[in-house]
Image (spheres, grey):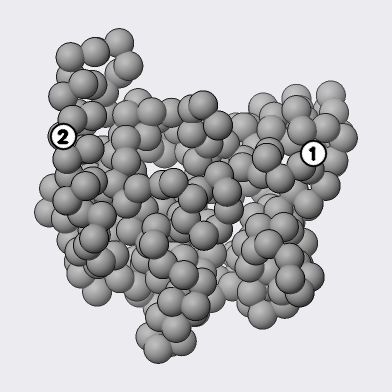
Amino acid sequence: MQINNNDGEALNALVNEINNIAKEMESKAADEILKWGFKKYGDRMVLASSFGAEDVVLIDMMCNINRKLTRVFTLDTGRLNQETYDLIDKIRLKYNIKVDVYFPKSSDVEEMVANKGMNLMYESVENRKQCCNIRKIEPLKRALKQFDCWITGLRREQSLTRNSISKIEIDTLNNNIIKLNPLADWTNEEIWKYIQENKIPYNELHDKGYPSIGCEPCTRAVMQGEDPRAGRWWWENDTHKECGLHWKEGK
């Protein structure tokens, strides 16, 4: 059950409960985190997937644990790469699961583009965040309303903005829904070892120098020696490099 910030007593109780669970579960493996989530939340738990390497690992794990209860959704911003669409279909067919797709509100996109152009994101951080808000954050909030727990593929080594995430958290930006990051302590090498050993389909852009894949206009391949997320919003300062889906208060 999601808790409004105004319900102080219930929120404090939830914070204490989750903090205790998070400490206990920190040493647990990714599949154990998922098993705990399935047991506690059942089909009220969902994976929000952008179909990056981490997400296909999680889909494989979830289906191995309980395919029937596995819920997955993705945000189609309208600016994704064709390779991402191809992968969505491959995953859907391989695992025989439904992938729910959430789109931005067309009226909001039409107004934004009419006022600021198709490529507004390159002009300022403010414009880019507006685009992310309309194409990603609003649809995410809409999608999460029906769930009590959501799963992400966040890992601590991905960026400075993610290096302190817990495996179990309270998402204060989304009505205090529970947020699981089962792969928080995984390395990139562990991700790819799992993919290769389990023969999981993955986005072909990974083989073309894209370790992190978002919208086509906002993602480029990275050069040797660059940070894995250097290809995301590459024209901005590093401190801004989150779209808002996982932006913590105070950062």
- The residue lying at 41 percent from left, 47 percent from top is 165
Label 2, secondary structure: give it.
Answer: helix
Q: Is residue 74 above or below residue 27?
A: above
Q: Is residue 148 above or below residue 212?
A: above
Q: Is residue 142 above or below residue 89?
A: above
Residue 56 quadrant = bottom left
Residue 65 % position (x, y): 20, 69
Q: Which residue is mark 2?
A: 17
The amino acid marked with disc number 2 is Glu
Q: Is residue 49 above or below residue 133?
A: below
Residue 19 % position (x, y): 22, 38
Residue 146 quadrant = top left
User: In the image, which disc is placed on residue 86?
Assistant: none
Q: Nearer the viewer, mark 1 or mark 2?
A: 2
Q: Quadrant of the C terminus?
A: top right
User: In the image, which disc is placed on residue 121?
Assistant: 1
- The residue lying at 30 percent from left, 11 percent from top is 6
Going from N to C along the chain, the mark reached first, 1 or 2, is 2
